[in-house]
Amino acid sequence: MARLHPATLLRRFRGRRIGVVGDFMLDRFIRGSVARISPEAPVPLVRVAPDGEDARLGGAGNVVANLAALGARPLALGVVGADASGRLLRRKLRQVAGAKDALVVVRKRVTTVKTRIIALHHHVVRVDWEDTEPLPEREQARLASRVRRALPGLDALVLSDYDKGVLTDALLEEIVGSARRAGVPVFVDLKVDRRLEPGVRLVQVSKQRAEEMAGIRIRGAKALELVGRHLLARYPCEALVLTLGSEGMRVFERANRASPAKGRASGGASLVADRTKPWEVFDVTGAGDTVMATLTLAVVAGARVLEAARLANAAAGVVVGKLGTAVCTAEELRAALGNRGGKT
């Protein structure tokens, strides 16, 4: 496969139809200042700023927002509760240019909301409202049906698993199987160990989650190699991307991609963040969603996985410089790549 110029890849992002299945949630932020300790308990007393409250799409919703910011046409496929937060989440989705909403509304289920209280850029506390019970079989069937109907019009399917009970093993099996039969590539962002069916194009796992899944602490290149090979052997995917924060990513691909269940893992390719200056990190919230969106679009646009990882690394460098859950636009990614001498 010939190497494509980043500008060509970015142009090919436009109009790509990407379905996103998973845990949709709201990220709420309450910002203010701390002048003293509360007289009621030894905790900081946060005085909320006049414009200090904000709500943004989180989880799978942030993947949708990032896909749209990069020029794609994402479709949201998941569940929300029949509550005020669910209605707000759907309004937020409608405000995302190019995005469509095919969410299932589930009565008696709480829409996931993560509320972060921040004082002078310091994260004081987070409060979560969520229902992590496995989605009832009836609702799983409703969501699987919507995914099947959407597949013929999609270029790819992203599974964004935050372990909130939506992507059960049974539903994963059904969705991956349907996508495989439809010829739609599947990209999975795993936060917990799952049983995956053959047919997954790429799995993304963070360093922390990879250590938990493999039961091995990553201390040095040999341990990293061992963890990567272990996970690639466990999951029947064509490629595995381990995200390593400011250290970049590590890509592992199978030597025999024609038969991922039997193929051996290739040696992989190291990627160290080759930026001209260190990232100015304000907040890492949602950076993995940005990586997932960029990886998916780049591979669908024709990039090799290592090329896609380099673009995703640059996109992550953009969003960690912003406060709160954020997106990287195509213009920002183009500028970031330009600042690195056109490298991907």
Image (cartoon, helix red, strand yellow):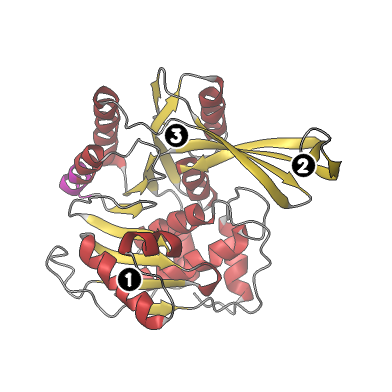
Query: Which type of secondary structure does the marked residue at label 3 adopt?
Result: strand
Which residue position is annotated with label 2? 42
Give the amino acid type for the residue marked by disc 2 in the picture: Pro
The N terminus sits in image quarter: bottom left
Residue shown at 49% from the left, 72% from the top: 248
User: What span is in magenta?
Assistant: 177-183
Which residue position is annotated with label 3? 100
200 and 205: which is toward the camera: 205
- Looking at the image, residue 198 sits to the left or right of residue 168; the answer is left
Question: Residue 197 in the image: x percent, y percent?
Answer: 19, 51
Query: Which type of secondary structure does the marked residue at label 2 adopt?
Result: loop
**Residue most extreme to the right:** 35
Where is 138 relative to 11, above or below? above
Give the amino acid type for the residue marked by disc 1 in the picture: Val
The CA span between labels 2 and 3 is 46 Å
Q: Residues within 10 Å of mark 1 (few under 14, many from 20)?
A: many
Residue shown at 54% from the left, 62% from the top: 315
